Amino acid sequence: MNIALHQELSQLLGDRFTTSEHERNQHGKDESSLRPMPPDAVCFVLSTEEVSAIVKLCQKYRTPVIPFGAGSSLEGHIFAPQGGVSVDLSRMNKVLRVSAEDLDCTVQAGVTRQQLDKHLRPMGLFFPVDPGADATFGGMASTRASGTNAVHYGTMSENILMLTVVLPDGQVITTGTRARKSSAGYDLTHLFIGAEGTLGIITEVTLRIQGVPEAISAAVVGFGSFESAVQAVTQVRQIGVPIARIEFLDEVMVKAVNQFSGLTLTEQPTLFLEFHGSNASVKDNVEQVGEIMREFGGSDFKWAVNQAERTTLWTARHNAYYASLAYRPGCRALTTDVCVPISRLAECIADTKRDLAESFLTAPMVGHVGDGNFHLLLLVDPNSPQDHAEAERLNERLVERALSVGGTITGEHGVGMGKQKYMKAQHGAGALAVMRAIKQTIDPENLMNPGKMLPPL
Amino acid sequence: MNIALHQELSQLLGDRFTTSEHERNQHGKDESSLRPMPPDAVCFVLSTEEVSAIVKLCQKYRTPVIPFGAGSSLEGHIFAPQGGVSVDLSRMNKVLRVSAEDLDCTVQAGVTRQQLDKHLRPMGLFFPVDPGADATFGGMASTRASGTNAVHYGTMSENILMLTVVLPDGQVITTGTRARKSSAGYDLTHLFIGAEGTLGIITEVTLRIQGVPEAISAAVVGFGSFESAVQAVTQVRQIGVPIARIEFLDEVMVKAVNQFSGLTLTEQPTLFLEFHGSNASVKDNVEQVGEIMREFGGSDFKWAVNQAERTTLWTARHNAYYASLAYRPGCRALTTDVCVPISRLAECIADTKRDLAESFLTAPMVGHVGDGNFHLLLLVDPNSPQDHAEAERLNERLVERALSVGGTITGEHGVGMGKQKYMKAQHGAGALAVMRAIKQTIDPENLMNPGKMLPPL
């Protein structure tokens, strides 16, 4: 990298600026199966002002800037395909403010979801969005993340009130207000949510939070076929019974989870359910949902009654990614992520299962099926070009299938480097041109996380 | 207007193009107290293609284009301060598709909320966002409207999946997909929601819809003071009891509503409540909320048990605007709209009440208080400069108060012509500059609803 920039960053940050190979490698890989691409240098920042100063310097020297949180991306978001400086926000990890009265809080971008959870639980509060990994809020905001609770509480898109953002010229802005709703001006908050760091760097996030419900019940129910499981879910959604989580695991994933997390679930298509509410309403919801499950041939509910049992269950679910990796030792996972209208979910899964049956690859399946969102974890030998090619082929077929039924190429993982090639098919040339125009006007030098999201022209 | 443009539009639309004074006047006024500003011509469109053709012609002749739905704006959104062509979408009034399975539907922009409701109810479905007026979905999307159900179901921002938009160059794009969530690219859907027609014209909207709940109960509860009412609401929100509607009317508004809609409510600070859910959960929610209301000195619930009683109650609430106008015959209303963090709501209302007590103007107050959102209807003699000045002064104090506690200058009515002067105070120079950059890149000639939302430089 440019020597003058090196000197200026070093002066600004002292030993929080590094070009060590170890740190560069750490900041050039994620949890995808993509080949790592390390940055030229790493900056560990402590404040919005430091991020602003770094961005200004990188503009001065025309050097790419790549924000880094926990490195848990599944699409190469934190890679440095054009070199540049990785801005590691993980030390900006303060919970700045919690209001139980307004049910909101403000965190620095490097706070992780588990850290916030530990902070909020003793106050009888929680934040519902829970991607599998212990991601940072900067990363979760930037990829429009969701997770198991989204079916009831929404995704990051519905749970952010305000952002502090460092723009490509180093200027610091805030978007939104602490009011629950606003009709004042263009919705910059939603513009930066999901922008994957390509328009600026998010440094603070104001979140909606929730009171821990009076009653929480979790249960597991097995099905003879995935079709029955999906039909049951569709029915639950249609009649509108409130359900906080409704997660699907196929028989392969159940096996992987049993092995990895020491569960003893029957290896069949399975739903993990959770209900939140008052004692009376949870009881009522459980009855309504139980009736539907039985109607579609579901097994009796196996209850996770106390907190410890529930934690075991949901930790196992959150570790599905690691369980899948352990299922084929030494492998990496190409983790797909599509989301379709729920009426088309069963056929999408069926066609995908057919593809898998004809393939030599193994791929556990898991899904936030209440939203029509599901993942395959295509397990590949990192050294096998055949495996990679086959995983890519299966992924491509799945993405095209999702598009053909009116779905999206990614429900929650983002575009990053992996899915740029499908952006035009999803959005059309006109909408993609609007995206490019926005990028061009906000980041004219294309220095903010370049090579991500928008496909090359 | 330009003669060549006149000829081309006339050729394109036949008698659906007019420059009649009557139609121009109809399309130059709304429900605000602002002085009307008629366009030079009106086009009644039947299709997205026609909108596209008109926009192309207006670009060719550098003529402003102003979308028009129902004319129910409260901030002069449909005015023509720089002249130009009003594009009336009210004849694009087809419900194009309803999916009970996916709980979504697609409507043309000219469909009104009551029209959609009539369409959906027989199918056991409904759309929850309900601004007071019978607005069109194009207008509701463009102002990020909400209403009485937003506390539970969200605003237009949370209830739109896709948009069809005619861009300033006449190109037609769609934003979003029918999937419930997506992480693919910049969130253009939310960019056009609330953009007030300044970036293009929305011609179709795909909405999330809901199943009509098994049980619906509505009730009225009176309080000795507005503080108690607001405290009770705050408490309900904090413990997270699901409540579909929680509306506040001050004693003046109750009197106005009694007179206009023939109700016989006690003239005191009052909450209108509604509960949605299963029979068991509604019963449970009512008990929980009832306990809180009693704790804060609320009267016994007066129930609106059957559909007819509920309709009477909510029609009266939706007619609050007209009830207020009737309260001072011959008046117009300057309808303010702020939204604040709920912890600051009581003090905001108290300070506002104090202002009103010292003023010569009368102003009924009504609020979606579960969201921290409330309105004053400042009743002014349209011919009295003193009344206008005083209303403007009170409005300004209220807006500044909302900003000082972290709120927004408008919760649901939009900026239009009325609130541009507060945009910088709310967003700051940096964020406002980002908005200007987006406007400049998408509408470089500033022909899409010019003079709205963004303050003059």
Image (cartoon, coloured by chain):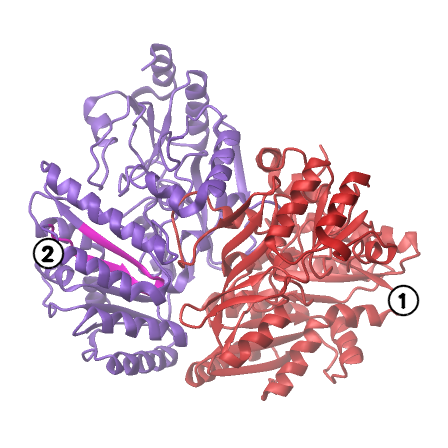
Chain colours: A purple, B red
Q: Residue furthest bottom?
A: B306
- In the picture, the disc for residue A231 is none
Q: Residue furthest left?
A: A329
Q: Quadrant of residue B115?
A: bottom right
Residue drawn at the location 33% of the way across and 64% of the way down: A344
Q: Which three-letter amino acid code belongs to the residue tagged 1?
A: Gly
Q: Are marks 2 and 1 in contact (CB under 8 Å)?
A: no
Query: Which one is nearer the viewer's eye here, B169 or B7?
Result: B7
- 10 Å crowding of disc 1: few (<14), some (14-19), many (20+): few
Q: Is residue B121 above or below residue A437?
A: below
Q: Which three-letter amino acid code belongs to the residue tagged 2?
A: Phe
**Residue B354 visible in the picture:** yes
**Residue A163 visible in the picture:** no
Residue A372 magenta-highlighted = yes
Q: Residue B325: x and y, percent? A: 82, 68
- 10 Å crowding of disc 2: few (<14), some (14-19), many (20+): some
Q: Which residue is mark 2?
A: A260
Q: Label 1: chain?
A: B
Which stretch did the figure color magenta? A361-377
Residue drawn at the location 24% of the way across and 62% of the way down: A349
* Picture quarter with the C terminus of chain A: top left
Q: Which residue is mark 1?
A: B330
Q: Going by the image, does A362 lie left or right of A97? A: left
Q: Residue A270: x and y, percent? A: 19, 68
Helix, strand or loop for disc 2: helix
Q: Label 2: chain?
A: A
